[in-house]
Image (cartoon, helix red, strand yellow):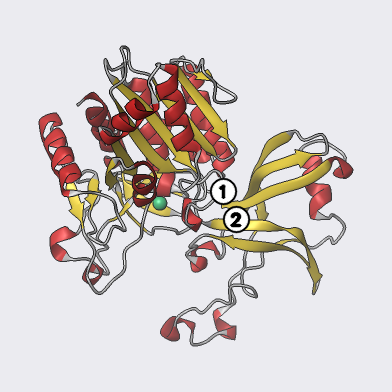
């Protein structure tokens, strides 16, 4: 079994998209990539640009670039986020008002020890990230004695009423005071904040044979980690510029300034072409010759719910990355792209699986169709198979993440 220690420390260090962007930036900086603060004519050959919870990194071609290989993934995961006026006091409890971000599997957040992380914005415009990796809050489940039918009729949670965490009983400290104390400043200096709850349990191997990984945020930090790992391992290509874009806000549909539907990647690709002296027409021509690999986790077949998969297209954990196919363009993989990935994986000796959903069951989506629509680039949707997607604690195979790195490397080198 692979060690996965790099992946584990990434997952444990990154409770929010801001932390993912920072972590990716750190790995890139450690491997000789230069941070750019804005788009400019003199972008570094190997560089990266952080935009809040998103990061874009690139390795320019050695000679004049003729195409891009773009690896896309998302930095955000469904979670609970502290509202601007969060303090609630009732029945002796201190509670926090939270907002549900993305498609949270609500029951998975019950009875977990939760930490709080995010960033603050100061009066002078500076931002600072914070992470309090301690048992601060918890959403207590109702005792079975007060809900006798719960096991037979199922747990029904009201999204507003039943997901309010408790975080103390002293009634003295406001959230604003607590936050200021965590970043060592006066509460009046904090003008705004984004504070996100997370399960403080660490990433770990699981199983009698250690063949599985459990952690929060496997969707989609496994792909973020794999994309950045492959990029720093890659060599400069002769005529191919490699770009890794990790976007925020995928879990809410990508429609934001820093999401995949925003203009950041498009602007960066144009800047990279211009830095090499390409005309606008040449740039469009490059896009038409390019490949985008949209990496996001896939649904493994669940042994207790096998009927939820199409038996012929049911990925199994530890059997390699999955190509996701959907004719209705929920996934962007074309038949050309599928054929290309199949052949490259075959040559590299990487096992590949295919997912297509049942016709009576909707499937998820990814940034793939969005970037394909914006850029007109041939796109393939791939990812490692997992269970419990969007749970506070997800499960995947221990072998698959490193196989995803190998596949991305093979696609870069092809
Ligand atoms: Zn995802």
What is the quadrant of residue 233 in the picture? top left
Using a 10 Å C-alpha cutoff, classify the residue at mark 2 as few (fewer than 14 neighbours), some (14 to 19) or many (20 or more).
Answer: some
Q: Which residue is mark 1?
A: 200
The total number of labels drawn is 2
Above or below 348: residue 390: below
- Which quadrant does the C terminus fall into? top left
Question: Sequence-wise, which precedes: disc 1 or disc 2?
Answer: 2
The residue under the point 33% across, 49% down is 396
Q: Is label 1 in contact with label 2 (beta carbons under 8 Å)?
A: yes
Which SS class for mark 2?
Answer: loop
Q: Is residue 230 visible?
A: no
Percent position (x, y) of residue 276? 40, 16
Q: Is residue 264 left or right of residue 299?
A: right
Q: Is residue 31 visible?
A: yes
Q: Look at the numbered disc 1 and say if its residue's Cβ is closer than 8 Å to ligand 1.
A: no
Q: Which residue is at the front of the view, 198 or 379?
A: 379
The residue under the point 55% across, 31% down is 50
What is the quadrant of residue 394 in the picture? bottom left
Q: Which residue is at the front of the view, 102 or 376?
A: 376
Q: Which mark is residue 278?
A: none
Q: Which mark is residue 113?
A: 2
Percent position (x, y) of residue 110? 55, 65
Above or below 11: residue 276: above
Q: Which residue is at the front of the view, 333 or 109?
A: 333
Above or below 118: residue 47: above
Which SS class for mark 1?
Answer: loop
What is the quadrant of residue 292 in the picture? top left
Using a 10 Å C-alpha cutoff, classify the residue at mark 1 as few (fewer than 14 neighbours), some (14 to 19) or many (20 or more).
Answer: many
Percent position (x, y) of residue 182? 76, 40
- Which quadrant does the N terminus fall into? top left
The residue under the point 24% across, 60% down is 301
Q: Residue furthest top?
A: 63
């Amino acid at each position: 079994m692979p060690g996965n220690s790099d992946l584990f420390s990434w997952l444990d260090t990154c409770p929010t998209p801001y932390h993912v962007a920072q972590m990716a930036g750190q790995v890139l900086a450690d491997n000789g990539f230069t941070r750019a603060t804005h788009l400019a004519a003199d972008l570094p050959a190997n560089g990266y640009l952080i935009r809040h919870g998103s990061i874009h990194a690139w390795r320019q071609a050695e000679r004049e670039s003729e195409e891009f290989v773009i690896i896309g993934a998302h930095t955000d995961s469904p979670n609970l986020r502290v509202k601007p006026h969060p303090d609630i006091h009732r029945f002796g409890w201190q509670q926090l008002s939270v907002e549900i971000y993305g498609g949270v599997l609500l029951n998975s957040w019950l009875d977990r020890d939760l930490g709080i992380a995010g960033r603050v914005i100061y009066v002078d415009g500076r931002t600072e990230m914070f992470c309090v990796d301690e048992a601060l809050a918890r959403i207590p489940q109702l005792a079975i004695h007060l809900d006798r039918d719960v096991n037979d009729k199922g747990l029904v949670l009201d999204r507003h009423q039943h997901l309010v965490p408790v975080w103390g009983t002293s009634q003295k400290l406001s959230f604003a005071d607590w936050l200021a104390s965590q970043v060592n400043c006066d509460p009046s200096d904090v003008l705004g904040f984004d504070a996100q709850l997370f399960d403080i349990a660490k990433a770990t191997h699981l199983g009698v044979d250690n063949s599985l990984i459990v952690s929060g945020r496997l969707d989609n930090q496994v792909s973020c980690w794999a994309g950045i790992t492959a990029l720093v391992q890659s060599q400069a290509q002769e005529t191919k510029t490699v770009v890794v874009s990790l976007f925020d806000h995928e879990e809410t549909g990508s429609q934001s300034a820093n999401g995949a539907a925003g203009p950041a990647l498009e602007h960066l690709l144009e800047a990279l072409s211009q830095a090499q002296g390409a005309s606008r027409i040449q740039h469009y021509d490059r896009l038409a010759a390019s490949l985008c690999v949209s990496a996001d986790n896939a649904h493994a077949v669940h042994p207790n719910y096998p009927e939820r998969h199409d038996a012929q297209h049911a990925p199994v954990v530890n059997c390699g990355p999955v190509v996701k196919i959907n004719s209705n363009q929920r996934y962007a993989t074309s038949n050309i792209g599928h054929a290309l990935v199949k052949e490259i994986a075959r040559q590299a000796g990487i096992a590949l699986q295919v997912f297509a959903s049942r016709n009576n069951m909707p499937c998820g989506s990814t940034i793939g169709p969005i970037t394909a629509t914006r850029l007109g680039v041939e796109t393939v949707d791939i990812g490692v198979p997992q269970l419990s997607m969007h749970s506070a604690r997800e499960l995947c195979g221990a072998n698959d993440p490193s196989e995803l790195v190998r596949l991305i490397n093979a696609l870069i080198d092809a």
